[in-house]
Amino acid sequence: MASHAYASSSLASSAPALLFLVFLISCLAAAAQSKLPPSSPEGLLKQMTKELNDGTFMPVVGLGTWKSQPNEVEAAVYHAVCNAGYRHIDAAQIYGNQDEVGRGLARAFKDCGVSRKDVWVTSKVWMVDFAPKDVSGAVDRILRELGLDYVDQLLLHWPVSFRKPPPGCPPACSAPFEGTDDAMRPRDKDGNVVNGKLDLAETWAALGKTKKAGKVRSIGVSNFNAEEIQNLVKGGEPLPAVNQVEAHVFWN
């Protein structure tokens, strides 16, 4: 079970610069401000939240599901919510295990006296779905896999786009996708990734429409730098609520 307090940046709507906030610091601040100290570690986890620039309150410690082993994720999510006090589950389209995450959540909601509104669920749109016309469909697919009516937060996973292979590829892949053996990672005949040429400001605007439609409560990005974030909002769209990045003592 891969549990971590991951790093994010909470972007104040009036601040043009990217402000990175390590979640551990947010945890300590939340605990210090609490009027009623928790009686257990589980209680502490439940009350550690951070208000984002869109007015939502995000639990700052989450269960990560990247690289979680098949047939283990469901039990891990169930244990995290029911027994360990986690109120944030971090998933993604590319992780390939959102159906198991959804089953773990469904069991927790049924068995443990935890309601849907009490658990913050984050997911991420993968780069083959960054074309504005594909974003809504990608969000619908994420919701189906998780078995949810909405997600609390949806992120653009990386600041680049991939060209989307046509239906039937693989295995039947024509140029420039001859080397593709995974539709999520399109490759040419030499094994190079087939990048797209999208303006991600348009992708960001399309993601914003899914929020307006009630499918997502909060939107953000992952692995972006400050310049890349500024490009997203050049047309007047709101700043991302978070920028999720990897940060720990073993990262170099």
Image (cartoon, rainbow, N blue to C red):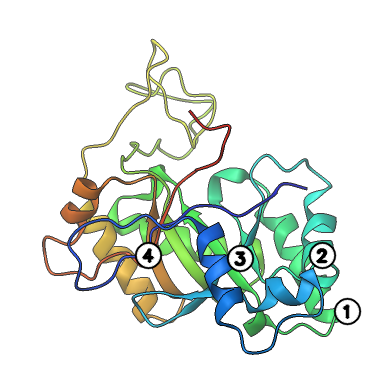
Question: What kind of element bears circle 4?
Answer: loop
Hey, what amino acid is under mark 3? Arg
Q: Which residue lies furthest to the bottom in this view?
A: 35
Hey, what amino acid is under mark 1? Asp
188 displayed left or right of 50: left
2 and 1 marks in contact (CB < 8 Å): yes
The answer to which of marks 4 and 1 sits earlier in the sequence is 4
Q: Position of residue 224 (x, y in %)?
A: 32, 46
In front of the other: 66 or 55: 55
The answer to which of marks 2 and 1 sits earlier in the sequence is 2
Q: Callout 1 environment at 10 Å: few (<14), some (14 to 19), or many (20+)?
A: few
3 and 2 marks in contact (CB < 8 Å): no
Q: Which residue lies furthest to the left in this view?
A: 235
Q: Which residue is drawn at 78% across and 42% down?
A: 70
Front: mark 4 or 1: 4
The answer to which of marks 3 and 1 sits earlier in the sequence is 1
Q: Residue at x 28, y 70 (%)?
A: 12
- Residue picked out by circle 1: 111
Mark 3–mark 1 Cα distance, whole angstroms, equals 21 Å
- Residue picked out by circle 2: 78
**Looking at the image, how many numbered discs can be counted on the residues?**
4
In front of the other: 167 or 102: 102
- Residue picked out by circle 3: 144
Mark 3–mark 2 Cα distance, whole angstroms, equals 19 Å
The answer to which of marks 3 and 2 sits earlier in the sequence is 2
Front: mark 3 or 2: 2
